[in-house]
Amino acid sequence: LFGLTLLAIAFFYLKMQIPLLWQKIVSPLVITGSQVSKPKFDPSLVLDSVRNSTKDLRGVYGFYVYRFDDQNEYGLHQNETFPSASLMKLPVMLLFYQEVEKGNLDPETKYILKEKDKVLGAGILQGKSSGTSYTYHQLIEYMGQYSDNTAFKVIRQVLGDEKIQETIDELGMAKTSLKEFETTPQDIGLFFQKLYQGKMISNEHREELLKFLTKTAFEDWLPKGLPGNIKIAHKIGKDLGTFSDGGIVLMDKPYIIVVMSKNARELEANEVLPKISKIIWEFENK
């Protein structure tokens, strides 16, 4: 009788628990916010893709990316020095605005172009007549839009090499040298980061500088790898064996991209720079 009683109690208990067990099985799994983890940041596929795209090319290619939304960064050879070429114009343009804001320079000061000022290569001033007048402000615009070498020479003389290097050092561009004319992808990335986020110059001047760098005469490298509706404020650097481009992709989640090369072939660089830009764009927008 005692055994039958225990057996009856056991059956009764199971009868009560089975519906509860069944409910747990069929109910959807609910994960609270504290249990949800963000996908781990992993740019390895991008790094592999860029390696594969450049491994059979002549010279060395380096790149650096900085994401403003989560402060993640990645790259290849990003701390290796490359010839800066016209990327050196960036800290010079920044220093110009700083000197204007300090009252040390009047941007409307007129400069009379001399024959000895003219520098071959990029720019439109080399083809202008001597004796033509330009304001300092116009020279800065030409440096941004046309990467004008003559404008760079004039403004460099106005500012002085010592002040330019001091500005480079203050930005933290530790491997950038005006004397050696060299820099790194990460140093150029740091420049754009501080320009975009920091208080290096007023918002008005920052927006003007970004405008000069957005619509340029050189849109066949990084911009070519982006969708047509996406803007990039960027600066190219081009010299013998050196084909580089860096800037800020202006979108909802902006990012910095800098691609540099040395001892490279121009025909190969013309193809691979847009390709690298596209690879990174697709990764940042997946």
Image (cartoon, rainbow, N blue to C red):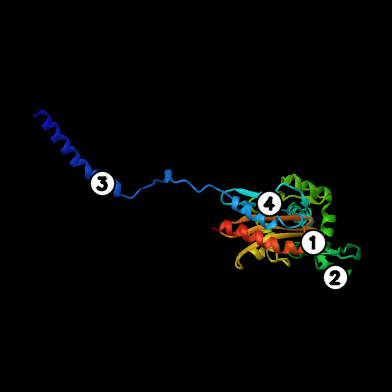
Q: Give, as a three-letter code, the residue at label 3.
A: Trp
Closest to the observer, 232 or 155: 232
Q: Residue furthest right?
A: 116
Q: Which residue is mark 1?
A: 136
Q: Which mark is residue 19?
A: none
Q: Position of residue 94 (x, y in %)?
A: 73, 54
Residue 186: give x, y in percent of width and height.
69, 49
Q: Nearer the viewer, mark 3 or mark 2?
A: 3
Q: Which residue is mark 2?
A: 127
Q: Which residue is mark 3?
A: 22
- In the rendered structure, the answer to whether residue 149 lies left or right of residue 211 reads right
Q: Residues within 10 Å of mark 4 (few under 14, many from 20)?
A: many
Q: First in sequence, mark 4 or 2: give its number.
A: 2
Q: Which circle, 1 or 3, is nearer the viewer?
A: 3
Q: Which residue is mark 4?
A: 189
Residue shown at 60% from the left, 56% from the top:
254
**The quarter of the displayed image where residue 119 is located:** bottom right
Tell me: 139 left or right of 191: right
